[in-house]
Amino acid sequence: MSTSLVAKLDAVFKPQSVAVVGASTKTGTVGNDLLLNLVRDKFIGKIYPVNPKADEIHGVKVYKTLGDIPDEVDLAVLIVPAKVIPGLVQESKAKGVKGLVIISAGFKESGHEGAEREKELTKLVREAGIPLIGPNCLGIINPQINLNATFAAKNAMKGSLGFISQSGALCTSVLDYAEARQIGFSKFVSFGNKADVKETDLLEYLANDPETKVIALYLEDIGDAKRFVEVASKTFWEKGKPILCLKSGRSAEGAKAVSSHTGSLAGSDAVYEAMLKQAGVQRVNSIAELFDLAALYTTQPLPKGNRLAIITNAGGPGIIATDTAIAAGLKLAKLEDSTKEKLKPPVLPEAAALNNPVDVIGDAHSDRYQAAVEVVMSDPNVDMGVILLTPQSMTDCDNCGKILPVAIKKIGKPVVAAFMGVKQVEEGVNNLVQNGVPNYAFPEDAVKSLAAATRLVETKSIAKREYVEYKDVDIAKANKIIADYLGSQTEKYLTQADCRPLFECYKLPLLKSGIAKSADEAAKIVSGIGKKVVMKVMSAEVVHKFDAGGVLLNIEGTDGAQSGYDKIYANIAKNVPGAKIDGILIEEMAEKGVEVIVGCNRDGLGPLMMFGLGGTLVELLKDVSFRLAPMWKVTAEQMVREIKAFKVLDGYRGTPKCDIDAVVDTILRMSALAVNHPEVAEFDVNPLIVHAAGKGASVADSRVMLRKPR
Amino acid sequence: MSTSLVAKLDAVFKPQSVAVVGASTKTGTVGNDLLLNLVRDKFIGKIYPVNPKADEIHGVKVYKTLGDIPDEVDLAVLIVPAKVIPGLVQESKAKGVKGLVIISAGFKESGHEGAEREKELTKLVREAGIPLIGPNCLGIINPQINLNATFAAKNAMKGSLGFISQSGALCTSVLDYAEARQIGFSKFVSFGNKADVKETDLLEYLANDPETKVIALYLEDIGDAKRFVEVASKTFWEKGKPILCLKSGRSAEGAKAVSSHTGSLAGSDAVYEAMLKQAGVQRVNSIAELFDLAALYTTQPLPKGNRLAIITNAGGPGIIATDTAIAAGLKLAKLEDSTKEKLKPPVLPEAAALNNPVDVIGDAHSDRYQAAVEVVMSDPNVDMGVILLTPQSMTDCDNCGKILPVAIKKIGKPVVAAFMGVKQVEEGVNNLVQNGVPNYAFPEDAVKSLAAATRLVETKSIAKREYVEYKDVDIAKANKIIADYLGSQTEKYLTQADCRPLFECYKLPLLKSGIAKSADEAAKIVSGIGKKVVMKVMSAEVVHKFDAGGVLLNIEGTDGAQSGYDKIYANIAKNVPGAKIDGILIEEMAEKGVEVIVGCNRDGLGPLMMFGLGGTLVELLKDVSFRLAPMWKVTAEQMVREIKAFKVLDGYRGTPKCDIDAVVDTILRMSALAVNHPEVAEFDVNPLIVHAAGKGASVADSRVMLRKPR
């Protein structure tokens, strides 16, 4: 699958010949601009413009039709009205074209008719076996072979960033931002409506592309969550390529805009957030952050730890950088005494601050900066560095930009700069970035980027990415139970008592229980449980069970059971006369513990598991975590540890540590339930009572909603 | 006070003549650069360089001494070694100099000796009655009279932003950033070690300066919290000038860096956060944000509401802007049908999206943008707008930059732009900003800035800023109680029972209570209370009162009281044999309610009040609010409403609304206690039980730490 995809997409990204169907003589049109880009940027293969009415455009001979081209055509770029596209796909097939990029709009994004046209197009190209990028896109760039098959006004510099974008217009700005920061690309793809080739296909292609070291994605929706997680996690953990993603449509309003803009139905952001985490993808919150991190990851090594050294020629910015570092979870490196010794005069002047932040003082020249960088960054307690420079009267900013990259390269630790200003530092910044040291306009962005790199390294360090296989679950029996409950209904709500047989199939930690239809039965059940119990009336007609005297706590012994049974009947007879009673539910009283919630909701993209502490306060503060099922064991552990209130489970203020393994096990078993049975539309175990370490957990209440999948 | 300060500082900011003492012939020195700036930037007054060894520098006649200048000297700028400064202050006094700026370092920032020198300097200038800016600063700029008395490589553009900075080096970058964004200044001050003139003096000066419309502060510490809050709140609420503040030293590590850098002792960040909120100052988190907001506030009107319109030529950026808006608390404006009607062809093409975000489509020229801006921004449901532009092949970005500011100015609502890119939009951006429309490199920053403006307007709308005067408190009696408790001790811990008489002076909502030394007394007290009570043993020797059987709940009636009394004595005799018992504390059982905490800690800057819900979870999640005492009533209300869990008090999921007025009243009474008695070093009421609306609150437990002020 993967190998064939690579081979197929090579025709798109590494063609030896490109036909531009719809090349135009009229300047300022897409058909003219795209051809111009190929010609001006000196594509190293052959270029064949196609236009029935022209002879030559931009100095290149034009052919009337694809078929007229007296050569093989690897890639055909189509810039013709949507309605003539189907015919051209047939022509392409006849010509033996190996890859298609369709720039033209007029498909899914334009409404119902366009959507039908797009379905037809997908069918056609798949029948023809030709991979298609687009339609409704800006095109693609492969700087390695000078292939600029876009109508953007700019080309991409050669480099190691693979960029995939669902927005074509954003790409035009991206090329401009990237140039200013000297960020080069391995491949640059605007994939438009993704009628055939999807974001995940492109990601897989870049994973296998030797030119690509870092991948950046701009996505508005993701079609296949499971495959995305598989491909992305392999790309990150196995191929070692960091993946950055700006996923828009975060807000409900934004998701609506995605939908009206692209015609895609976006899932809720919680799903995307979960999916990206599980895939090892680093989500960024802004375009600026995408560039900030891409600039770092494409030029610097990843840090070995989180200890930052700050070298500055001004106190204020040093403090600002310190604040940012601490807020972002970094530590200020504690310099060795020998390091401070080495910094003493004449290396730095008497007035210099030798503690981190190291202040080289306002009158520092590049040589002093260089010495400080060499000494400080060699300290074994330093994992990474940021160099701050304010342009003061003595500062030779230009020279700093030349000298420092040399010093930094030798060190083998990530170092970034914030030369602060615009015009006054322009030349210095150019020197820096051209020599592979990222510069940030402000110290805050520089430090935040380094902090993101530490988080990336932490994620990367997750070693065991394994699914737990539960051999003790009885899928067939669960299927039967579900089928019986549903019967011919499309939907069925299961109460706590209903959930029981289903949960037993998955070995969830249920409390001992039984249903008594007589006082004697009650006595038998209670003595069987051998612990204090709760007795609850089972009756659809008694709504407020507690108020009606239908619930008794702390019952023990056979006598207690019998008199409890009678008491409940008497209470109900008095308080809800005539209510039909189906029996008395008797359940073991759970040991004390911390109440948590494990829930699941089925989104278009898969079963979304939820975890949080119990209680309204947590609900109010939205302190919950989400992941998609199925998940690795480590993912379930992350779910539990990620909530802010995790300490409550981990032994806080003298309370004992809870049985976190039992929580993880429950989450994983419930994930299996969700994955194995698409009819399980929603469920909650609320609360799951978590006991002290080693003592397990108990399902104290639960509900399930079954729904026939459409 | 204020008038005299203005008059005095006018000599510094609006001098008719400036002496530069320490003007140097050597290029690249501070003494040479500063004089050059005065000359090159064409100061409209007279310039008198002073240097015993030179005749002319930068074409200006040099005088041997201050005394030699044959004219009045309004402002003297001193750039001479620290040790000769005292003599020069004397000379300045003799000459009748009216204002001083001391650039020279070698004072508090350089250690103990420097600190002593600075104290001496402060004494000298105050005796001389000459206001001093500095020492250890970059200088000052007043663009209105072309006064650039700094050694920065750049001048400031003329404008309406007053800028005050504790970091001189930061100023050099600030001038560069500001120029790039065309932000002009009314006054620009680097105030250095603030040996005489403080940040608050400068703020007060700018509050009264007609050229200043917006104020930006970079501060590392604030000396006098009370005065700062007074002056800043007047500046903001009464003079209507927005104040932005970047306060560094947020983290403990950052605060340490402030301390080693400036020699100031910074308070905890919670105090600063509280102080800035109370003062109506808008705190920013980064240098970038300072500029983002300054650019907006100096050019655009403030919004009337939070409904945003987005006009874009690309879908993706529109979605990104939408996400940012929702996350930042803005709403997407719902356009009137008549507005959409007006946008229909031929104004916008058929394919345009007429719902907000309004997509003018990739091929839009400036005329289409203009029409969209005029129509959309005139919609009564729109409070503010952002214009997004990606440079596509048809986009006439330059022209958009020219035309749109004209359209925007007519509307009278804030509108900002994000022309996305660097080189490709450079000319367009220049046109925009020169015509008074702020541009942001990315849509996220543009939208966040508008959101900040809405928050500013909300803060501004706080109408009643009044202190509550409690006439029913007995300060004298409280003083006596405190003095008695402290006696000759420097510190004294008050238990719940000890707190009682003190709290009574402040009419805090105490539960009815009494101390019984016999079973009969207990009976009398309980019948007096007339409700269920708690009985607690009073004994320093019984540490775990509950475990020892020293606490009984739900006691009622005289019989219950008597047997309870005896039972406690029996329990203690059995469980803690020989323990000395001081009596039994009997206290009314509080009605149910929500438990909250009201606390106070005394920082160097004043009594810092704290509010939060009770319980360890809240502590863990740090969901608490802080303010300095004294505070307005509205401030106490903010404290209560600001916590994330406020809904728990406000009626959540069917629970009744709590008596929020009672909480506010308690906070204010406790603030009064803290303000009136400097000996009250810390206290906690934990929990204060808040009952249903109208039913008040009850102090259920408390502690106070008294400490003799040093």
Image (spheres, coloured by chain):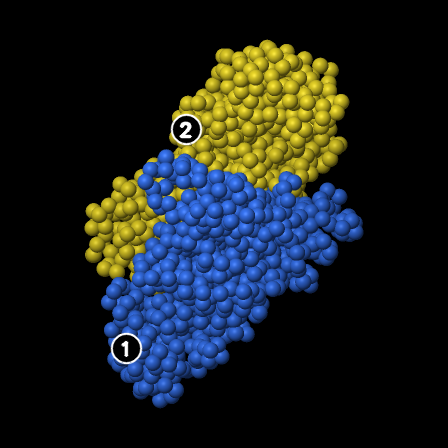
Chain colours: A blue, B yellow
Q: CA distance from mark 1 to mark 2?
A: 64 Å
Mark 1 closeness class: few <14, some 14–19, many ≥20 residues within 10 Å = some
Give residue B629's position: percent from left, percent from top: 55, 24
Residue found at the very far bottom of the displayed protein: A70
Q: Please indicate whether residue A320 sits to the left or right of residue B695 in the image.
A: right
Chain assignment, label 2: B
Q: Please indicate whether residue A272 sits to the left or right of residue B247 in the image.
A: left
Q: Is residue A284 visible?
A: yes
Mark 2 closeness class: few <14, some 14–19, many ≥20 residues within 10 Å = few
Residue found 72% across the figure and 32% down from its top: B114
Q: Quadrant of the C terminus of chain B?
A: top right
Q: Please indicate whether residue A552 sits to the left or right of residue A446 in the image.
A: left
Taking depth in this image into account, of A140 and B2 the one nearest to the observer is A140
Q: Which residue is mark 1?
A: A86
Res. B237 mark? none
Taking depth in this image into account, of A523 and A675 the one nearest to the observer is A523
Q: Please indicate whether residue B574 sits to the left or right of residue B246 in the image.
A: right
* Element class at badge 2: loop
Residue found 50% across the figure and 16% down from its top: B530
Chain assignment, label 1: A
Q: Which residue is mark 2?
A: B462
* Element class at badge 1: helix
From the viewer's perspective, is residue B681 above or below residue A145? above
Give residue A403's position: percent from left, percent from top: 65, 59
Corner quadrant of residue A45: bottom left
Give residue B412's position: percent from left, percent from top: 31, 39
Residue found 48% across the figure and 73% down from its top: A205
From the viewer's perspective, is residue B110 above or below residue A46? above
Q: Is residue B604 visible?
A: no
Amino acid type at image mark 2: Ile
